[in-house]
Image (tube, grey):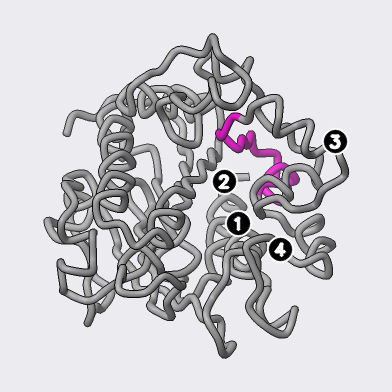
Amino acid sequence: MEHRGAENFRVVFLFLDGVGIGKNNPSVNPMLQADIAALRWLCGGTVPVQPFQDRCSEHAHILSVDATLGVAGLPQSGTGQVSIFTGVNGAKKFGRHFGPYPPSPLHPILAKKYLLLQLQQLGKRVVFANAFPDKFFDYIESGTRHLSVSSLGCKLCGIPLLTIDAMLKNEGISADFTREKWCELGHPDVAAITPQEAGKHLHQISLQHDFTLFEYWLTDHAGHSRDMQFAKNALEQFDTFLASFLTYTDLKTTMVVLVSDHGNIEDLSTKSHTRNHVPCIVAGARREEVAAHIKSLVHITPALLRLFDKNT
């Protein structure tokens, strides 16, 4: 892959909801059926399957990360994502796994320890690159706290959420990459784009920031559907986006982190989440400085903060 990029070190964090390390069984694991060449390229030619041990490819460290957090039951998005984005074990703190949204007793932790906030306090330029329609902001104004950890963390910490205006300037990314659903969300004049274009836009956004976060939730939705074609499509669309992003990105100056909060899509034999470990892929610049410290979801934020603190 061709790499063109900027001079300064930066991190792009790609959060994938509901992606675990599944069995080597293509009848239930769409990761083995989907055309996901970019992910395979990062992983050295094959996607992680059970049994899996941490390994290095030419481009990345591929880690098997415990998502259960030492708590009985099936991991859930709310407590799992709090753990990822604060370094605090959300499930233990709350007493059980909880989701899809973070429970209110964990909101003060998010307000104080949200990764993007802590990076801002180190003087870093941060952005949550997902763009949201007007209806989403109306929903927030209604007083709801039923938001994902990424969105709620930004709201609690005063970090701006991106609007349709940012997206139309290619400074924000639609959650589905293509913007095809925006007419159904009250914006009939929004033209569709390709995942390849969205990948290029993410690269351009990342050049303006030290840390860029993008959240992709369709993988979890596809896992709950138990629909193999839907699951393959969700994975392939993300992979097309990723391949485009990597084409423009210089991995000598950029670290790319991909991680999930719990298993789901890797096992379509069940509609529920799984207790499988999740993949954490740390690619590009200075990857060994982060990968060496990650064994569980709670280690990701401290590892990244340690890295950036060295640059302060």
The residue at the point 26 percent across, 36 percent down is: 240
Residue at disc 3, secondary structure: helix
State the residue position of label 1. 305
Q: Nearer the viewer, mark 1 or mark 3?
A: 3
Q: Residue furthest left?
A: 45
Query: How far is mark 4 from mark 1, CA to CA?
Result: 22 Å
Q: Is residue 305 left or right of residue 109?
A: left
Residue type pointed to by label 3: Glu
Mark 4 is surrounded, within 10 Å at the Cα level, by few (under 14), some (14 to 19) or many (20 or more) other residues, namely many
Quadrant placement of the N terminus:
top left
The residue at the point 45 percent across, 73 percent down is: 272
Residue 102 circle label: 4
- Is 89 situated above or below 194? below
Residue 141 circle label: 3
Q: Earlier in the sequence, mark 1 or mark 3?
A: 3
Residue 253 among those drawn in magenta: no
- Is 9 situated above or below 207? below
Mark 2 is surrounded, within 10 Å at the Cα level, by few (under 14), some (14 to 19) or many (20 or more) other residues, namely few
Residue at disc 4, secondary structure: loop
Q: Earlier in the sequence, mark 1 or mark 2?
A: 1
Mark 3 is surrounded, within 10 Å at the Cα level, by few (under 14), some (14 to 19) or many (20 or more) other residues, namely few
Mark 1 is surrounded, within 10 Å at the Cα level, by few (under 14), some (14 to 19) or many (20 or more) other residues, namely some
Residue range of the region highlighted in magenta in the rendering:
116-131
Q: Earlier in the sequence, mark 3 or mark 2?
A: 3
- Is 233 situated above or below 25? above
Place of residue 203 in the rendered image (x, y in percent of width and height, measured from the top left): 41, 28
Q: Is residue 67 left or right of residue 63?
A: right
Residue at disc 1, secondary structure: helix
Whether label 4 touches label 2, CB < 8 Å? no
